[in-house]
Image (cartoon, helix red, strand yellow):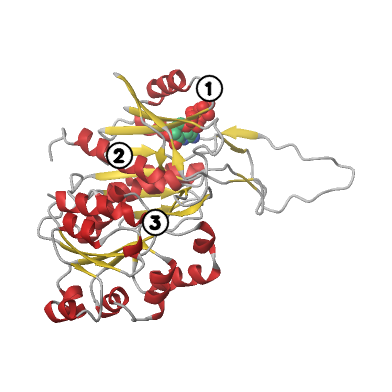
Amino acid sequence: MTLSDKNILLIIGGGIAAYKCLDLIRRLRERGASVRCVMTHAAQQFVTPLSVGALSADHVFTDLFERQDEHDVGHIRLSREADLIVVAPATADLMAKLANGLANDLASTVLLATDKPVLVAPAMNPRMWAHKATLRNVATLRADGVHFVGPRKGEMAESNETGEGRMAEPLEIVAAIESLVDTAPKPLAGKRIIITSGPTHEPIDPVRYIANRSSGKQGHAIAAALARLGADVQLVSGPVDLDDPDGVSTNHVQTAREMEAQVHALLPADAAIFVAAVADWRSADSADEKIKKVAGAGAPAIQMVENPDILAGVGHHKNRPYLVIGFAAETQNMIDNAKAKLKKKGADLIVANDVSHQGGAMGGDDNMVSIISRTGTDEWPRMPKEAVAARLALLVAERLKTISV
Ligand code: CTP
């Protein structure tokens, strides 16, 4: 029971995603939490206080001026008695009120009166989410320390539009709540894990370099998921456009050789996970000065040499970590190629992803992977990179359970 004795105050905003709150309440109570609900006037157009009250097994609070509500509990006590306030769905209107300190109904008054952590799960039409006013409010809320889960990309319930704006799934919201109240189990406490992520940049001259399309999203998500399970995570990241993940030590590098040196400097470790899309080759001698275009001289020939294989170097190292995991991006014969890589690189597991499909792993938000070990293959369904990360982190915890501490 990861949430036993926790009091969650759930503020339900007026959006079609309000129906998902019924499931959210059930999931939270299954984990031992007490859930008390506040519904805005608009929320009651989508789900009834009767259903919300039946699932939460408590009075549902709807009105700032209702004598019974204000007299019995009051907005100050409502926020004081909670360990965490969750706003789901967080509509554009609710976020705008919170960002600007407006308090003209029970939900916004509770939010202004609280000093407890607040988690919002936005849900709205993609155009509303992308509107400058909403972006401004989101930035203000983040700066104020409000936590976010979602929104996700996907089809909108009320129209045929797709885009960013769909509320995170109830289980994702539960995971975010667990990590905020910090009652999530820590099966990786005391374990040191090295992880590489992102592309590498191989210089040709001081201004030009060879790179690839890796965004680092998957590797960074895995680093964050491992940290949430209590691991001491050492992330070695190539150049990416992402924030350093929370709770992780991030080491920034540019080239494959720098990445290799950093990984070896961080050994020994209990596990090492190689997610980085390391450039296979680099320019043999990167020029110290910018290569000039000389009329009539034609294009310069770039002599390439092979980069060290970082995964293979660690997989075959005499002090190799107990668990070594590689990734394989394939466009054909995915399973066979991954099996060959397992052997060649001395890995225990290969996470193979098919990068041939449109909107595939490279740069996208979703991933569909197969986990290949010496004993078989486990195919996982397509899911967001965060979900792949969470599941892989649990698999790592399972595998590391067998080493004595
Ligand atoms: N890898 C590495 N160092 C390299 C190249 C790759 O550590 N110089 C790691 C990657 O991080 C990944 C795995 O090896 O975990 C597989 O990389 P991939 O590029 O798919 O395989 P290659 O060995 O480069 O084979 P190919 O490109 O021919 O598929």
Q: Which mark is residue 210?
A: none
**Three-letter residue code for mark 2:** Arg
The local crowd at label 2, few if under 14, some if 14 to 19, many if 20 or more residues have their Cα within 10 Å, is some
Give left or right: position of 21 versus 4. Answer: right
Badge 3 amino acid: Ile
Res 279 → quadrant: top right
Q: Secondary structure at mark 2?
A: helix
Residue 120 appears in the picture as rendered: no
Question: Mark on residue 391?
Answer: 2
* Figure check: 357 above or below 188: above
User: Residue flagged by tag 1: what amino acid is it?
Assistant: Gln
Placement of 144 over or under 378, stated as above or below: below
Asked whether the beta carbons under mark 2 and mark 3 sit within 8 Å of each other, the answer is no
Residue carrying label 1:
332
Q: Which mark is residue 16?
A: 3
Please tell me which residue lies in front, 99 or 344.
Answer: 99
Residue at the (17%, 36%) spot, across then down: 401
The answer to which of marks 2 and 1 sits earlier in the sequence is 1
Q: Find the residue positioned furthest to the right.
A: 296
Question: Which of the two discs, 1 and 3, labels the residue nearer the N terminus?
Answer: 3
